[in-house]
Image: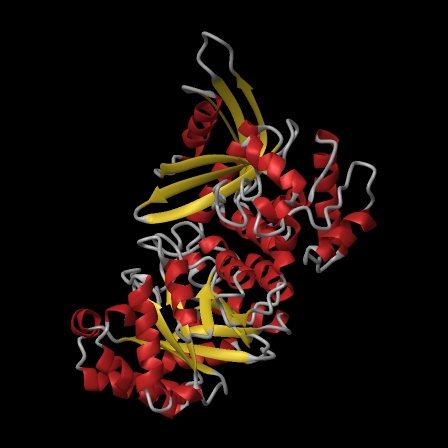
Amino acid sequence: MSPQPLIIFDTTLRDGEQSPGASMTRDEKVRIAKVLERMRVDVIEAGFPAASPDDFESVRAVAQTVRDSRVCGLARALEKDIERAGEALKEAAAPRIHTFIATSPIHMQHKLRMEPEQVVEQAIKAVRHARRFADDVEFSAEDAGRSETDFLCRIIEAAIEAGASTINIPDTVGYNVPEQFGQLIETLLTRIPNADKAVFSVHCHNDLGLAVANSLSAVQHGARQVECTINGLGERAGNASLEEVVMTVRTRRDVFACDTRIDATQIVPASRLVSTITGFPVQPNKAIVGANAFAHESGIHQDGVLKSRETYEIMRAEDVGWSANRIVLGKHSGRNALRTRLKELGIEFASEEELNTAFARFKDLADKKHEVFDEDLQALVSEAGAAEHERHALVSMRVCSETGETPVAAITLSIEGVEHRAEAAGSGPVDATFSAIESIVDSGAELKLYSVNAITSGTDAQGEVTVRLEKEGRIVNGQGADTDIVIASARAYLSALDKLSTDTRRAHPQLGDV
């Protein structure tokens, strides 16, 4: 008997973006959406259109671009939210509106300040209104993991009757454990009279490290859609990791009576792209996509793998995108070679001018390092996109660091076209560079995180630096890449300052997520 389809609902562009500092531009969201489409993700939740004008435009851009995946917009159970989502999705090939309302006693009492009867009425009205804009409507019972089962049965039955074709059961605060959560799904499927008229979905958070385990338990008990993100990105401790859910179901077909339509060879490229754009590095021991996921240090393990891969590996690295289609460019590669490879990576330019700018950056990089890999190209395009909107630009810098002496950095910045120069000392070359920048801009921001990640292997590899700044409760991430770590650090700091100087505040879906 062929396996049942398991729908993969990716919410990297919506819930993933709620990670502190993980904001994405419209163009970056479109780039990620194209990769998700190429991966054959069933549903792409592109954002929360009512949050801000930028969010609305991002959802609309994704809806206009994606043709082979369903595009979804989130909306609270409010008419204005639903209408905004409907407008953003108007040009989607296959639109879905995802509306939600809280159902747990604590949320109904303290957040909504509504009686259960009012919540049911609001849910019915929301689903019916959403059906005016899309035939495909998903209803989520926010904080279902802490809701009363009887009330869940009642509101879900009403939502299905009103026209919802997908019912999502979120573990909003990551409170549940696998056996309990799986049993909840089975109970709902058994007790709700019209449960057969909808696909049951789960959306699990990782506060106790159980998001994937809870999702898979739900699948074993009848759920047929999993909401997840690339790299497990998401608010607080994150969401269920798409790559772990997909590869567990595929690897353990003896346990799961379902499978996804995901092209797993796109998993690693998608992981790297999301990491580059958001500035959230993937930990080396992360399952599936971490640098050590298929590495073997033990001599016994190495010997076993060489004799028969199956002794210590349950998946093939190439099946999830490691080393697949690895084409290397160099300084002798031409514009057409660059254009062709970027197109294969899902990156196309709107004009020859944009291609020329990218090609000039590529040539500069190729002069510094012998081989330019796909990861270098992704970082290059990300920086080129950020450069279009930069307010703070690095003109030149000189750093002196020697044993027994205090490091000193001299830097020249262009701020909205006007050059400024400064010199500062610091405990190290990076600290001196940041001090010199701050002596010019005086941002008042606090450095919360500084990390360096090698984009590729080798001593000539680019270093990708992430800088996280906080000011007045707002957190932003900036990224910079260069073969010189100090230059990359300066670019990352300036990237973060650019984001701080732009007002991109947005409404939170619920001051919390679904």
Q: Estimate the x, y position of residue 162 in percent, counting from the top left.
A: 37, 91
Number of numbered tags placed on the structure image: 0
Give 434 or 483, whichever is nearer the viewer: 483
Q: Estimate the x, y position of residue 176 in percent, counting from the top left.
A: 28, 63
Whether 79 is drawn above or below 489: the answer is: below
Give 47 or 288, whichever is nearer the viewer: 288
Whether 308 is drawn above or below 171: the answer is: above
Residue pictured at 75% horizontal, 42% vertical: 328
| 87 sits left or right of 315 in the view | left
Displayed quadrant of residue 158: bottom left
Residue pictured at 52% horizontal, 22% vertical: 410
Give 429 or 251, whichever is nearer the viewer: 251
Image quarter of the C terminus: bottom left
Displayed quadrant of residue 203: bottom left
Q: Estimate the x, y position of residue 300 in percent, counting from the top left.
A: 56, 33
| 114 sits left or right of 343 in the view | left
Residue pictured at 63% horizontal, 51% vertical: 316
**Colour treatment of the image:** secondary structure
Q: Estimate the x, y position of residue 31 in percent, counting from the top left.
A: 60, 59
Give 334 or 1, whichever is nearer the viewer: 1
Whether 10 is drawn above or below 386: the answer is: below
Q: Is residue 389 visible?
A: no
Whether 218 is drawn above or below 466: the answer is: below
Image quarter of the N terminus: bottom right
Q: Is residue 49 visible?
A: yes
